[in-house]
Image (tube, rainbow, N blue to C red):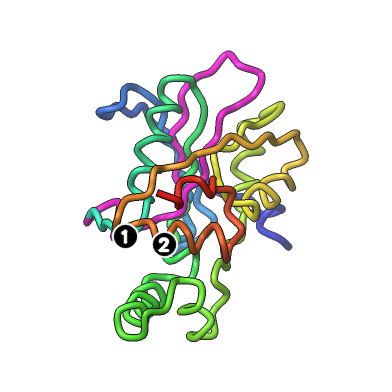
C-alpha cells in the first residue's frame, strides 16, 4: 500500500498570525513528528489554486541563517497566499528530506573542505535531494483543486506534484542572492537544475 492509498488523520482550526486570518491544517500519516504535514489555507475564488510546498529549514526559519534563501521564500510565499488565497504546504523534513544530522554533517564538510551542498551529500553517500512528494499529492487531493499554480524554482517538485493529475503551472519564486546565499543559490541553479535567472549571479 502506498502513502497515496493510506488513510491519514486530519485536523483543522481557525488560525490568525501576523499575515492575517486563515485555516491551519495538520495531515498525519504516522506516529512520528515528520509524518505530519502542515497547511495554511486561505480562501480563494480563483479556479487556479496558488500553492507553495516548502520543506523545513530550521537553521534559516528559526535561527535566521544567512547562507540560504529558505526564510525569505517562506515569508514571500505566505504574503502571496494571504493576499491572493491559496495553500502553503509545509513538510517537516529538514536537509531536503535527508534529516538534520546529514544536513549539519554536510555543512561541516563545507566548512572544512569547501564542498557545496550537492557535493557534500554525495561525499556522505546521500541523495542530494531525497524528498518524496507522494504525501503532498495526497494532501492536495483533499482540497480538490481544478488546477495549480506552484510557487517553486525546483523542477523535481514540479514533476512530483504533477502526479496529482491536474494541470500544474509554474510560478517563479526567486529571491535576490545576498553575499551569504549567492554560492548556495548558484549551486542550486548549476547542479540541481533549479529555474533561477543566471543574470542574478552576474552582479
Residue at screen point 50% across, 32% down: 87
Q: Residue furthest front?
A: 203
Q: Secondary structure at mark 1?
A: loop
The count of marks equals 2
Question: Is residue 154 a member of the stretch shown in magenta?
Answer: no
Direction from residue 85 to residue 21 in the image, left or right = left
**Quadrant for the N terminus in the image:** bottom right
Percent x, y of residue 31: 46, 62
Q: Which contiguous range is marked in magenta?
A: 38-63
Q: Quick one: label 1, few (<14), some, or many (20+) residues within 10 Å?
A: some
Q: List the residue tagged with mark 1.
A: 67
The spot of residue 190 in percent (x, y) is: 57, 62
Q: Is residue 172 above or below residue 104?
A: above
Q: Quadrant of residue 59?
A: bottom left
Relative image position of residue 17 (x, y in whole percent): 27, 29
Question: First in sequence: mark 2 or mark 1?
Answer: 1
> Dot 2: few (<14), some (14–19), or many (≥20) neighbours within 10 Å?
some
Residue 110 pos. (x, y %): 36, 77
**What residue is rendered at 58% in x and 13% in y?**
45
Q: Quadrant of residue 165?
A: top right
Kindly identify which residue carries mark 2.
Answer: 184
Q: Residue at x 62, y 39 (%)?
A: 140
- Report the Cα–Cα distance between label 2 and label 1: 7 Å
| Whether label 2 touches label 1, CB < 8 Å | yes
Q: Secondary structure at mark 2?
A: helix
Name the disc covering residue 13, or none: none
Q: Residue furthest right?
A: 165
Q: Is residue 25 above or below residue 108?
A: above
Give the camera-side residue of 122 and 13.
Answer: 122
Amino acid at each position: 500500500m502506498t502513502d497515496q492509498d493510506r488513510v491519514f488523520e486530519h485536523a483543522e482550526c481557525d488560525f490568525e498570525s501576523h499575515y492575517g486570518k486563515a485555516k491551519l491544517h495538520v495531515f498525519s500519516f504516522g506516529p512520528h513528528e515528520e509524518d505530519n504535514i502542515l497547511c495554511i489555507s486561505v480562501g480563494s475564488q480563483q479556479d487556479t489554486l496558488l500553492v507553495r510546498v516548502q520543506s523545513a529549514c530550521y537553521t534559516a526559519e528559526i535561527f535566521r541563517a544567512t547562507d540560504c534563501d529558505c526564510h525569505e521564500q517562506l515569508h514571500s510565499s505566505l504574503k502571496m497566499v494571504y493576499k491572493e488565497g491559496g495553500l502553503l504546504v509545509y513538510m517537516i523534513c529538514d536537509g531536503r528530506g535527508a534529516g538534520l544530522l546529514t544536513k549539519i554533517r554536510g555543512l561541516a564538510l563545507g566548512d572544512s573542505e569547501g564542498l557545496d551542498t550537492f557535493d557534500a551529500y554525495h561525499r556522505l553517500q546521500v541523495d542530494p535531494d531525497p524528498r518524496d512528494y507522494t504525501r503532498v499529492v495526497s494532501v492536495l487531493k483533499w482540497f480538490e483543486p481544478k488546477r495549480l499554480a506552484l510557487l517553486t524554482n525546483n523542477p523535481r517538485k514540479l514533476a512530483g506534484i504533477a502526479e496529482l493529475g491536474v494541470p500544474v503551472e509554474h510560478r517563479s519564486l526567486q529571491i535576490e542572492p545576498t553575499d551569504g546565499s549567492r554560492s548556495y543559490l548558484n549551486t542550486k541553479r548549476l547542479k540541481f537544475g533549479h529555474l533561477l535567472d543566471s543574470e542574478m549571479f552576474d552582479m
